[in-house]
Amino acid sequence: MKKYYLGIDLGSTTSKAVIIDENDEIIGKGITNTRANYMVATEIARLEAMYNARFTILKQKLREEVETSREYARYIADVESAFKFLQFNRRLEKLNMQFKETISNTFKGEQQERIREFVNDIIEKIGPEIKHEYLYGDIASKNQFFRDIVSERFNKEVAKLDKAYFDPLVLVYDKSITPVENELTDYDFKELIFESLEILNDKYAHIDETFSTNPGVVFDAEINLLKGNYKKIYDSIKEHISFIANLDIQITNMVGTGYGRALLPFPEKSIKSEILCHAFGAHAYFPETRTVLDIGGQDTKAIQVDRYGLVTSFHMNDRCAAGCGRYLGYIADEFSISLNELGPLAMESDHEVNICSTCTVFAGAEIRELLNVGQERSDILAGLHKAIVMRAISLLARSGGVRNEFTFTGGVARNQAVIKYVTELVKKNYGDDLTINIHVDSIFMGALGAAMFALRSKN
Amino acid sequence: MSSNVSKEKSMVIQKEMIANHFKALSTAKESGKKVVYTFVPGNISELILAFDMLPVYPEINALQSGMRKKSDGFIQDAEQIGHSEDVCTYVKCDIGMLLNGNIGPTGEKIPPPDLLLLSYTGCFTFMKWFENLKRLYPGVPVAMLHTPYQEDGQIKPEMTQYMVKQLKEEVIPKMEQVSGVKYDEEKLKGILRNSSKVEDAILRIFSTTKNTPSPIDAYFAGVYYIGPINSGFRGTPEAVNYYEELYSEIMERVRLGLGPITPEGEMEKERFRLVVEGPPNWTNFREFWKLFYDFGAVIVASSYTKVGGVYDLGFRVDPEKPLDSLADYCMNCYTNLNLEQRIDLLEQCIVDYKADGFLVNSIKSCNSFSAGQLMIMKELERRLEIPVGLIESDLVDPRYFSYSNIKNRLESFFQMLDQRKTILSH
């Protein structure tokens, strides 16, 4: 039986899990933004990684088919999207129940009735919309959290309603979302995946109808092939799906890291510092890495590593929120936008405002002042992104500078504007020849490093 | 068993010495003894004793207040009268203590100074500190002893002459005036003979960490060991007796192959040997020490235990040249060395004491110690290819001690050391 290794990274903003095989290959990844408690967060991330691992194993089993026929690859991607939709939908049902409970506990009489109607209407509107996006759009591949997906659409609908209901509806949402996020939803993989196949059968059976009524949906070559072919693929894939659904993925060893690591019920030797894990993970992706910058939710780390990926020294900013991801969270709140929207908005700027504030809290005052004097939101946001990167550059300088190659990791490394300024400032300070590595999975580097330590310390 | 009994003996001796000193201070008025306030780095206590006066060290009082959990309130009181958040917390703690009746660590009142002996050894804050004390104790004479910085890494004859001149023209006349006692060079020579013995013993004591396991912790326990020489006992027979006793106790531990004694018990397994730069945190001293104990880390050498005198590089007082010796002693104190000398000294410690890593405890409010520490780190990392680490805390302001942050960094640092050891052993 194959052996698998699990790494868990309990961060302050998100918790991540990575499963690798004996060759350091990533088999599964899972992430959650739940703030419930570390046990729930670990479990959610671990289960997500397990589901993801089953899909990876499925793709490995069907490698030949996937490589030779495009419709196969598309069909499996569609199964995964449908699966994610079903996961999403279970949570949405829970959220709807929570909405009802919150409304009955918070409001009375006519107001209660009105709000209940509004919320029902919103759910009925956004539910099918989101389903459509899962089945025909790219929402499943965006790695968005449940909260982000729902809040964006919920807020849009609320904005269309009478302003008098704005505050009560936002209150209902805020009070309901956290308990749902913090609850562990255990799905039956087998049940969900077969349900996904049925959804797909239905999707392809009615594909012509869908296209005639939804001009926005792109009819491409793979869909055309699948239209007449889906039953054949379904028949040939069913057996493999059964196999991966019943597969017993044995975790041989696991290592935990991140700020919450001390709370993990792991033995002491299975708890590793996130500095070592991030460096190890970054080095695994990019073996020439010598300097790692990790901007996480709660701290920023500049790490120097040797050719084996071993840490030789590190410097941390764990004193000031202005140098880490939390700063961006705070800024998003100040602008009343989601964290995901920050980077793209800042990228719209062509000349960033100089933000002098080095303090997260006082940056709020500076933002209001800049807005008052008529500065563009995008320029202010760009300035804020630059400010956080300037701090990281100073930390890098203190830690001994940047050596080639330079790898940028952590949750913040997903933000395009941060990437832009990191690249710009690192090159400006340390030369254009420097290789800068940023991976789409940079948020998983810590968990990957932990999993690699688990593999190496199995005995 | 025998080692436990003897361990207690040196501790008992020290406790008695300190208690007697504070008793003498509290009854100075009745006994007619004059009181001199001065600083630990470059403290010329022998000269004070030669005039039969009693020394008081405000930094020692401040760190004692920190350990007794009093510094928080003292600092806030000093801030209330206008001292900024960024001012050295020793200063604020001392001023706060003064505002609260100047009660010392033994619960007895510390008398006001009859002389403020400002020995300036590179810490600019010392001057500002005594400017404040001068205002708070109007009319008390101030004797300034300016120690030239070892800019070129050496003591030149004219530097010694410059200091001796100050001693002769500024310090000694003021001491004679305040104490009413005539300067007696023979008496000073006698005191310095004891100092010389103490200096030898201290070097022997701190060299015992060359053993594996190290019998002592040269930082956390080290600060207790340097207690007597930094609190008025340089050159006294009591100090000679204390250090000889301490040395024989430690040698007994070496003979038995025992590790250091800590408040959590004896360190059974020495996992890491470190050299530490920078003063410790005093407000959470035991907690701070326990973090190292929990990781099995022993400090085999520390720069902080050299603030009252650096003996590793061969310096000893020469009783036959008393004023020259005092001058050279001041110029040799750790904070008066240039960065290159500090790096050389730390490098020597790391190599001689077979340290696995180098750690800096950077003190928020101590600029004179903290300036240059990053450079020191980088240079040591470059020269010796050893793991280096940095933690941040403060002397006596508990607001700047974050247990979880320090623990998190130390955990990473020790895991880094561990990983390196494992790889290097293969």
Image (cartoon, coloured by chain):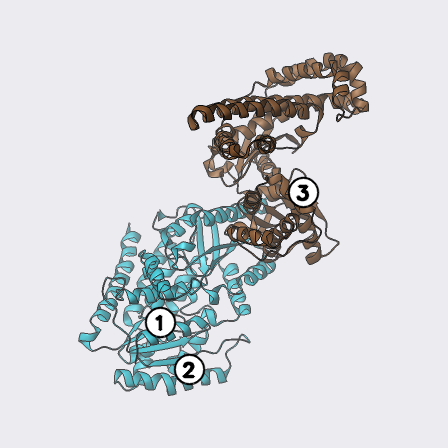
Q: Earlier in the sequence, mark 1 or mark 2?
A: 1
Indicate the amino acid at tag 3.
Pro
Closest to the observer: A69 or B320?
A: A69
**Relative vertical location of residue B371 with respect to residue B50 in this rendering, above or below:** above
Do dots 1 and 2 share one subunit? yes
Say whether residue A369 is left or right of residue B235: right
Indicate the amino acid at tag 2.
Asp
Circles 3 and 1: CB atoms closer than 8 Å: no
Q: Percent position (x, y) of residue B46?
A: 33, 76
Task: Select label 2 or label 3 by which is in front.
Answer: 3
Q: Percent position (x, y) of residue A249?
A: 59, 23
SS category of the residue bearing label 3: helix
Checking the image for residue B197, the label placed there is 1
SS category of the residue bearing label 1: helix
Q: Report the Cα–Cα distance between label 2 and label 3.
A: 70 Å
Circles 1 and 2: CB atoms closer than 8 Å: no
Residue underneath mark 2: B324
Q: Percent position (x, y) of residue B411?
A: 49, 46
Q: Quadrant of the C terminus of chain A?
A: top right
Q: Write down the chain letter for disc 1.
A: B
- Report whether residue B35 is seen: yes
Checking the image for residue B106, the label placed there is none
Q: Report the Cα–Cα distance between label 1 and label 2.
A: 18 Å
Occupied quadrant, residue A144 = top right
Chain shown in cyan: B
Residue underneath mark 3: A344
Q: Percent position (x, y) of residue A334?
A: 55, 45
Say whether residue B39 is left or right of residue A257: left
Say whether residue A249 is left or right of residue B408: right
Residue at (71, 51) in percent of width and height? A350
Chain shown in brown: A
